[in-house]
Image: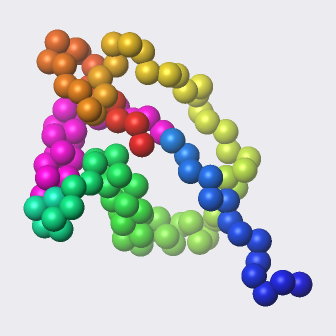
Amino acid sequence: MLKLGKLPDRTHAKITITLAPELNAALRDYAAIYRETYGEAESVADLIPFMLQAFLDSDKAFAKARRASPPDAEKEKPSRRTRKPRSGDVTSSSSSPSSSLPPTLEI
């Protein structure tokens, strides 16, 4: 038996989310304040995974529930089929006031 166990799955998942305009603006503000604080510019899409990880790490009820009954990720299937963004979808890199759809951010 090797001292080093089998490495975990390191395949990154790409998801697309739709944001309310207020949340999109707050995330852009956060990225700007991050740049002012640390002197390095990071995109909102680069910051979000770390923000989500920090949130999950700080949620004690989630950690307790997860330890009590860990989900079987291999058996879970998406609840609905995902779609590719349509040509009219708004992404975080563009802002079109004429669009009635909230901004979409690909992570």
Residue for point 64% across, 63% down: 70
Q: In front: 73, or 91?
A: 91
- Where 94 sits versus 29, above or below? above
**Image-based side of 59 in relation to 69, left or right:** left
Q: Is 30 in the magenta?
A: yes
Q: Quadrant of residue 51?
A: bottom left
**Quadrant including the N terminus:** bottom right
The C terminus sits in image quarter: top left
Place of residue 96 in the rendered image (x, y in percent of width and height, measured from the top left) = 19, 19
Image point (14%, 52%), residue name: 32
Which segment did they paint magenta?
A: 15-34
Horizontal and vertical percent position of residue 77: 67, 39
**Residue 46 shows in this picture:** yes
Tell me: 95 left or right of 43.
left
User: In this figure, what is the number of numbered marks?
Assistant: 0
User: Is most of the magenta stretch helix, strand or loop?
Assistant: helix
Residue 27 is one of the magenta-drawn residues: yes
Farthest bottom residue in view = 3
Residue 59 visible in the shown view: no
Examine the rendered structure and indicate whether residue 64 appears above or below residue 101: below
Q: Position of residue 20 (x, y in %)?
A: 24, 33
Q: Nearer the viewer, residue 70 or 24?
A: 24
What residue appears at the point 28 percent right and 48 percent down from the top-left corner? Answer: 43
